[in-house]
Structures are given as structure tokens and as C-alpha cells.
């Protein structure tokens, strides 16, 4: 299995939603294993009830979850580390500096990977349209996670910078359920694109 690690603060809302929504969007039998952790999380079993309700409304599975703190071992063992905000990406890099080229925010990675893979492959996209959407409107699918990560890392130093907040998913902690649902939909859009970029065919 190839591990993709999502990171937020408490491992209660954002990273949980990203983990389980990516799992729901990947093809059956995918070699990609989504996981999550929090920079200030405590170990505890079970998913927060409002998170689970929103997740299941979007088609995700809330069973068998346990929150856990982010560790250097988790970062080092992941093929890709995706913070839900810049502070989470930076926390991962501080724990495991050698993993810097594999650490991004979720939105940053999707943005950079789409551009980098398109340039690396050049020309046409995949031969099959997904969900009735023409190929030219979908991201290119590649055969390995390492290719996608390398493309994104290469573009990070040359792509025009964005305001930092553009690459963050705002924390819904303590906000109304409608804000949590909006957060979940934002994450779902990003991980749905990520699932297409990964193609469900990362190296085993």
C-alpha cells in the first residue's frame, strides 16, 4: 500500500474528512491508503458525531476511525503528506525535514500537480471521459504517485505564488454545522480531483 497522510490540528474535522472522502472517491482495489493525524490531536477512538454525519451525507464511511497525533514516523512513512493548512504542512516538515518534497497543503498539491502533470505528459489527456465530463476538462491521470509528487514538487519553485490563505481550508471547529458542511464540500472537491490524479494505481 502507498500511504497518503492528511494533517490538520485536532484530527477531528478536516483531516478526517479528507481521509475518508478520498477513500470513497478512489476506485475499488486502489493501492492508495488514505490516513490522517493532527498536530495537537489526542489518541481517542471514534469519529466526532457532526463530522461523521457530514461525511456520510457525502457518501463516506465513518466506521473504525481513531484520532491520533502527528509524529515523525507517520510523516516519514507516507508517500505524500497533505496539510489542510500551511501550518500543518510546516509542522510535518519540522518533524521530518527529509520529507519536505512530499509535504504540501491539499489545495496546493492539487493545483501544482495538475499543472505539473499536464506539462510532463504534454498534449492530450486520458482516452476516456469520467462521469460524462470531456477529457479536456479533467486532470491527466498518471500511473504512479511518485510521478505526481515529483511534478508538483518541481512546479512549487516556479509557479506564480498565491496568497497563503488560498491554499488553506478554514477550520470549522466551533462553527455551525452549515460551515462544517461547506468545509466538507470544499475538501471533497479537492480529494475528488486528487483521486483522478492518482488514478488509483500508485505503486504497491
Image: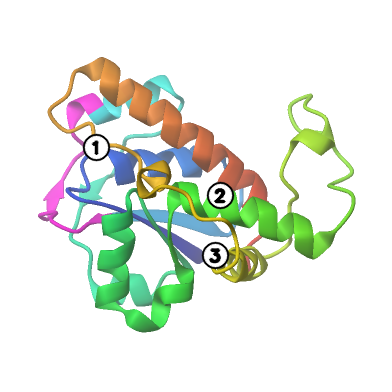
Q: Which of marks 3 and 2 is in front?
A: 3
Which quarter of the rendering shows the C terminus? bottom right
**Residue with the mark numbered 2:** 110
> Within the magenta stretch, is there residue 85?
no
Eyeballing the image, is 74 above or below 110? below
Q: What element carries label 2?
A: helix
> Within the magenta stretch, is there residue 48?
yes
Q: Is residue 176 left or right of residue 191?
A: left
Magenta residue span: 37-50
Eyeballing the image, is 26 above or below 121? above
Query: Where residue 202 sits: x, y (%)?
Result: 63, 63
Query: Where residue 196 sits: x, y (%)?
Result: 66, 45
Eyeballing the image, is 11 above or below 186? below
Q: Quadrant of residue 82?
A: bottom left
Q: In which quarter of the image is residue 203?
A: bottom right
Q: Can residue 189 be seen in this view?
A: yes
* Number of numbered labels in the structure image: 3
Q: Residue furthest bottom?
A: 98
**Residue with the mark numbered 3:** 156
Look at 47% across and 49% down and name the residue there: 162
Q: In this view, does 48 lie to the left or right of 121?
A: left
Query: Where residue 119 sits: x, y (%)?
Result: 77, 60
Separation of marks 1 and 3 at Cα, in angstroms: 24 Å
Separation of marks 1 and 2 at Cα, in angstroms: 19 Å
Separation of marks 3 and 2 at Cα, in angstroms: 11 Å
Look at 57% across and 49% down and name the residue there: 111
**Residue with the mark numbered 1:** 171
For disc 3, the neighbor class at 10 Å (few under 14, some 14 to 19, many from 20) is: some
Q: Can residue 27 be seen in this view?
A: no
Amino acid at each position: 500500500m502507498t500511504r497518503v497522510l492528511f494533517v490538520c490540528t485536532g484530527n477531528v474535522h478536516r483531516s478526517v474528512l479528507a481521509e475518508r472522502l478520498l477513500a470513497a472517491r478512489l476506485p475499488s482495489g486502489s493501492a492508495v491508503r488514505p490516513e490522517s493525524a493532527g498536530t495537537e490531536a489526542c489518541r481517542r477512538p471514534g469519529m466526532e458525531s457532526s463530522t461523521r454525519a457530514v461525511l456520510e451525507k457525502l457518501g463516506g464511511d465513518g466506521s473504525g476511525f481513531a484520532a491520533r497525533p502527528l509524529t515523525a514516523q507517520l510523516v516519514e512513512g507516507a508517500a505524500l503528506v497533505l496539510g489542510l493548512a500551511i501550518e500543518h504542512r510546516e509542522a510535518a516538515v519540522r518533524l521530518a525535514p527529509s520529507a519536505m518534497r512530499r509535504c504540501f497543503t491539499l489545495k496546493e498539491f492539487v493545483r501544482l500537480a495538475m499543472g505539473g502533470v499536464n506539462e510532463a505528459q504534454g498534449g492530450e489527456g486520458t482516452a476516456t471521459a469520467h462521469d460524462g465530463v470531456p477529457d479536456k476538462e479533467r486532470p491527466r491521470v498518471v500511473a504512479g504517485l511518485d510521478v505526481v509528487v515529483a511534478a508538483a514538487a518541481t512546479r512549487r519553485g516556479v509557479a506564480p505564488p498565491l496568497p497563503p490563505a488560498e491554499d488553506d481550508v478554514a477550520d470549522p471547529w466551533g462553527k455551525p454545522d452549515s460551515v462544517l458542511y461547506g468545509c466538507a464540500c470544499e475538501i471533497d472537491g479537492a480529494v475528488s480531483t486528487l483521486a483522478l490524479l492518482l488514478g488509483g494505481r500508485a505503486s504497491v
